[in-house]
Image (tube, rainbow, N blue to C red):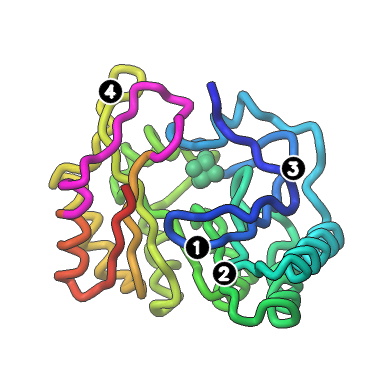
Amino acid sequence: MSTIIYPSPIFGPVHSRRLGLSLGINLLPADGKVCSFDCIYCECGFNADHRPALPLPTRQEVAHELELKLQQMEAEGQLPDVLTFAGNGEPTCHPHFAEIIGDTIGLRDRYCEKAKVSVLSNATMIHRQEVRDALMRVDNNILKLDTVAPLYINKVDRPNGSYDVGRIIQHMKAFEGHLIIQTMFMRGECQGESVDNTGEEYVGPWLEAVKEIGPRQVMVYTIDRETPSHSLLKATHEQLDGIRDRVIAAGIPCTASY
Ligand code: SF4
């Protein structure tokens, strides 16, 4: 199984399909994964297979390593287009996520003021005021919403503990458009059950929720790398294009990545 565990707290830069030259900021340990979801398509693998022994990086370590890397990139004449919070799990799980966002914005302003700060999050912590306030400060607040069907969420995203999608949608609405919704569409099966969310029974209610939330953009995508569950299939170009076009027809910009 060739899933990826990223260095911590800084990795890359890497060229991202969606974001450009992206310097990664990983607020999770370097030797494993910590996430409030356990998605069957996660490129980091299943949580149980990658339990870390190392602690989370501290706020000070993140700021120090980020500044060193930006100084190095500045000296090489290649500054990033985006500083992306991603990596081995859910960045908003870090207890000092809000302070780290503040530090990162300060370093961005000092070294690469044109770069965007992006956060890729599964939205499970947006009930916390300090997390919402921090996400309001970043340029690209990218929040996962794979479906609105609780059974599908439990089968595919597999939240640890309780997860109320209705409540998540209400908190997403509170961003008043300052968010990008990211949705994984795929086909195939897991443990003998279909995990295809490309049909109307999933796309229709999802689209209604998206319209209710009113994000400034939607990103639909499909599996790109090896997944821990091996019987998953990519959504087709035609399926993604069709979903993208329906979002655009609803007046919301949307991109599809294959
Ligand atoms: S939310 Fe992201 S990091 Fe967490 S399990 Fe799912 S794909 Fe992996």
Report the Cα–Cα distance between label 3 and label 1: 25 Å
Secondary structure category for the residue under label 4: strand
Residue receiving disc 1: 20
Q: Are marks 1 and 2 in contact (CB under 8 Å)?
A: yes
Q: Which circle, 4 or 2, is nearer the viewer?
A: 2
Quick one: label 4 or label 1, which is nearer the N terminus?
Answer: 1
Point out the frontmost of discs 3 and 1: 1
Residue 37 appears in view: no
Q: Which residue is mark 2?
A: 81
Numbered disc 2: secondary structure = loop
Q: Which residue position holds label 3?
A: 29
Mark 4 = which residue?
193
Residue at mark 4 to residue at mark 1: CA–CA distance: 36 Å
Tell me the kind of residue under disc 1.
Gly
Q: For the magenta stretch, what is the residue range?
A: 224-241
Q: Is residue 252 left or right of residue 134?
A: left
Q: Residues within 10 Å of mark 1 (few under 14, many from 20)?
A: few
Q: Residue at x 66, y 67 (%)?
A: 78
Circle 3/circle 1 CB separation < 8 Å: no
Answer whether labels 4 and 1 touch (C-beta < 8 Å).
Answer: no
- Looking at the rendered image, the disc whose residue lies closer to the viewer, 3 or 2, is 2
